[in-house]
Image (spheres, grey):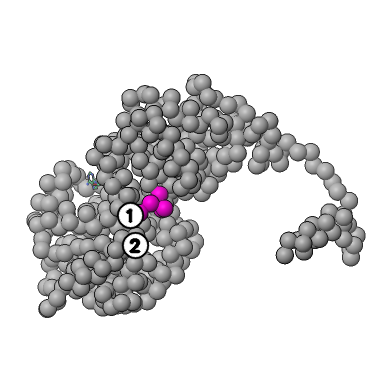
């Protein structure tokens, strides 16, 4: 399909899309928009970066603007449930952009910011509500949000909802929704628990899979550098001396490490900020805005905070630490090479992260190119060793198999006796 005009969307929506500068619909938009306009349910296996938001936002805007508004105060007719505040803010912004020529109202509710303004705004009437689960339940509990006129329900990033422990909240919300509704279900990956949840929610859905499950975008050049933990800061500094590292997103596993890396870089007068769950919502929004505007060259983030960050022109993603969940690797590197651009993802791997790398390579289905032409290359890290000691599977492999005599039935071996005594003492 060469143009949005081939889709049966109303002209105010097509005009709004045109002003965004998109020339043609992305594959998920081509596949999802027509059946959604017919009112079908949808099961989408898609990552962010594929144009997923417009794929559901455009048909929702079309549907709501075409049907007569309920009399009196506006009622919530579309609900988009998403796991993070950043995503909620981004999605509501997309609704506003694509719906700029319509008279529909969209708002986002999420935690970490004052509740009162959200209560007042919701009370005044809204057509489209984008929400994170916890705050939505709060507002439903106080009666500020009522979902009885709901027509369309979107569950976004379902796999991440489950990972973040939101499943019970999500189920409680679903119970409150009218049974007669259109349901859209998106997830980057489809593990069993997610597929089960989808099965209970959808009726004869259209199934769309735009990229194979959790497969990184081809345009990202991926590499791994083996480096000892203590040399990572030095390696990072060296890399950032290269001006081609224009807009860089760095990932760490912990909030503490994110702050530490950001602090070190700011001492080198690099424009840097950090974003993670311990930061107040306005600080997170400000950090993201600075990065988006280009004032901040480097943003250091943890996985949850970065989920769904939609910032164009990120030239490099650096995994300062590898994620312990292989799926997170795919999400992380997908922050670059967005909207048709190229990008690079460089992973620092120390000896104790060798197993994480193995899991990632197993999941993506190919080995990541090893970059050895840098001064910090550590052959030891590559062999899965730290300070001369093998760790993880490398340690298991290097250990000779010692067959211990089996304790006789009823008898407690000396090791087990010691262990039991230790456990009792620790109680
Ligand atoms: P999403 O997958 O919804 O997070 O979208 C990823 C990025 O693609 C966002 O920056 C969108 O603005 C952009 N985008 C969405 N649809 C199109 C399109 N048809 N052409 C070009 N860019 C798009």
Q: Residue at x 24, y 40 (%)?
A: 293
| Image quadrant where one finds the C terminus | bottom right
* Other-residue count near label 1 (Cα within 10 Å), few / some / many at <14 / 14–19 / ≥20: some
Residue 159 screen position, x and y as percent: 43, 58
Q: Residue at x 60, y 39 (%)?
A: 352
Mark 1 lies on residue: 281
Can you tell which quarter of the image residue 350 is in? top right
- In the displayed structure, would residue 180 be above or below residue 55? below
Inter-mark Cα distance, 1 to 2: 8 Å
Residue 422 screen position, x and y as percent: 78, 58
* Front residue of this view, candidates 133 and 71: 133
Q: Count up the numbered dots.
A: 2
Mark 2 lies on residue: 111
Magenta extent: 276-281
Q: Residue at x 41, y 53 (%)?
A: 277
* Front residue of this view, candidates 356 and 193: 356
Q: Are marks 1 and 2 in contact (CB under 8 Å)?
A: yes
* Front residue of this view, candidates 7 and 301: 301
Q: Is residue 418 left or right of residue 286?
A: right
Magenta stretch: includes residue 278: yes
Residue 275 screen position, x and y as percent: 37, 46
- In the displayed structure, would residue 241 be above or below residue 191? above
Does residue 85 show up? yes
């Amino acid at each position: 399909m060469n143009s949005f005009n081939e889709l049966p969307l109303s002209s105010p929506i097509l005009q709004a899309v045109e002003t965004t500068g998109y020339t043609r619909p992305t594959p998920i938009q081509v596949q999802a928009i027509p059946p959604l306009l017919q009112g079908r349910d949808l099961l989408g296996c898609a990552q962010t970066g594929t144009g997923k938001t417009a794929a559901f936002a455009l048909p929702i805007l079309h549907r709501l603007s075409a049907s007569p508004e309920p009399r009196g105060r506006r009622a919530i007719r579309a609900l988009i449930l998403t796991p993070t505040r950043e995503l909620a803010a981004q999605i509501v912004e997309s609704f506003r952009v694509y719906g700029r020529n319509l008279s529909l109202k969209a708002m986002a509710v999420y935690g970490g910011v004052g509740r009162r303004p959200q209560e007042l705004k919701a009370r005044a009437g809204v057509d489209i509500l984008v929400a994170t689960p916890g705050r939505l339940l709060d507002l439903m509990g106080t009666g500020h949000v009522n979902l009885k006129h709901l027509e369309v329900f979107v569950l976004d990033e379902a796999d991440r909802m489950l990972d973040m422990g939101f499943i019970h909240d999500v189920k409680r919300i679903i119970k409150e929704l009218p049974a007669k509704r259109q349901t859209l279900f998106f997830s980057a990956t489809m593990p069993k628990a997610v597929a089960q949840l989808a099965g209970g929610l959808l009726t004869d859905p259209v199934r769309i899979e735009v990229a194979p499950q959790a497969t990184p975008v081809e345009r990202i050049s991926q590499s791994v550098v083996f480096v000892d933990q203590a040399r990572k800061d030095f390696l990072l500094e060296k890399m950032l001396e290269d001006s081609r590292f224009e807009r860089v997103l760095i990932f760490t596993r912990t909030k503490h490490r994110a702050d530490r890396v950001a602090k070190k870089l700011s001492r080198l007068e690099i424009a840097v900020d950090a974003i993670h769950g311990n930061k107040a919502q306005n600080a997170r929004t400000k950090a993201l805005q600075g990065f988006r505007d280009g004032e901040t060259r480097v943003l250091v983030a943890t996985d949850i905070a970065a989920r769904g960050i939609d910032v164009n022109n990120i030239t490099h993603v650096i995994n300062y630490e590898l994620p312990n969940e292989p799926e997170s690797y795919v999400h992380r590197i997908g922050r670059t090479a967005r909207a048709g651009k190229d990008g690079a993802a460089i992973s620092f791997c120390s000896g104790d992260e060798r197993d994480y790398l193995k899991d990632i390579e197993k999941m993506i289905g190919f080995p990541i190119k090893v970059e050895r032409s840098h001064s910090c290359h550590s052959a030891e890290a590559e062999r899965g060793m730290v300070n001369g000691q093998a760790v993880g599977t490398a340690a298991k492999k290097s250990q000779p198999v010692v067959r211990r005599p089996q304790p006789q039935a009823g008898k407690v071996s000396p090791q087990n006796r010691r262990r039991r005594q230790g456990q009792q003492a620790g109680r």
